[in-house]
Amino acid sequence: AISLPSSEQKAIPKRTFPVKTNIREPSLKQEDQDDENEASANDSPTPNETAEAPQNNTENESPPATNTTVNNTNTETIAEERLTAAIKFLHDKGQFNIVIMGSGIGALRAHDFLKSITPVITDKKLKDRIEKPVRAFIMFNARNKFTTAADDYKDWFFDPEIPVLDIYTTTDRRNLYDVKKRGVLAKQDGALEYSQARVSEMSFETSWGENRLSRRIRSFLDARVQGVEVDNATIKN
């Protein structure tokens, strides 16, 4: 499991005019009013004293608001660095049968990372197969757009050889809307290894240590990315 930073949010638009507030003093009860009158009478100035009026000619006006912006740190760069470190950690442990699963915005980030590290073979005369560092990709309630992006992400299926499992639930309307658009893109790009899985409801009840979601993922892994055990393997840096 990889902890990724929260995605950047759009800056709050700058306020174009100050906001004036009308603060009204709370009404006093009769007893409190009598006590206040008595106190003001005792505090009234003597004939030889002059009372100075408060020099406050300003209205009840709030200070002009400043524009609130997001942190300048590039969170997407941090997310990519963490994904890179995770892949390197697995490689150092001798684990090369790797599948990435992303949820929500994390699915977008994982796919961007997958695209950056996956070699694409453009020369048809090249016979040697280039091994891919990630063998499959699983999405769970993936989003189609970053919070700071104006348009939807459309490059989901840049490599038709990578098996993709798109899992979604029906508890959020956005899931149904986004997965429908990804299905259209998959047909347009000829993604034969792409499949969708609908999970109507999530349950904590398990059978043989599995629930609906884990069983669906396990069947996908068994069918598409089964691992192979290699004895006496040597890791070369």
Image: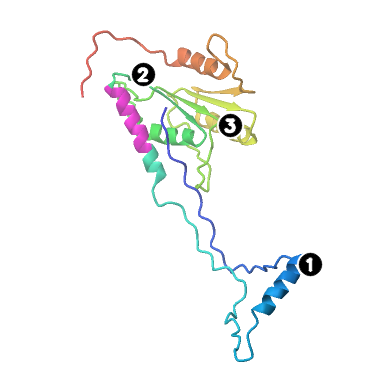
Up-down: is 65 above or below 96? below
Q: Is residue 222 magenta?
A: no
- From the viewer's side, name the closer residue of 18 and 23: 23
Q: Mark 3 points at which residue?
A: 179
* Residue furthest bottom as drawn: 48
User: Looking at the image, is 17 positioned above or below residue 237?
Assistant: below
Disc number at residue 97?
A: 2
Mark 1, residue position: 30
Calculate the distance from the C-alpha at mark 3 to the C-alpha at mark 2.
27 Å
The kind of residue on which mark 2 rests is Asn
Q: Earlier in the sequence, mark 3 or mark 1?
A: 1
As rendered, which of 29 and 132 lies closer to the eye?
29
Can you tell which of label 3 and label 2 is closer to the viewer? Answer: 2
Labels 3 and 2: the sequence-earlier one: 2
Q: Which residue is drawn at 32% across and 32% down?
A: 85
Closest to the observer: 73 or 225?
A: 73
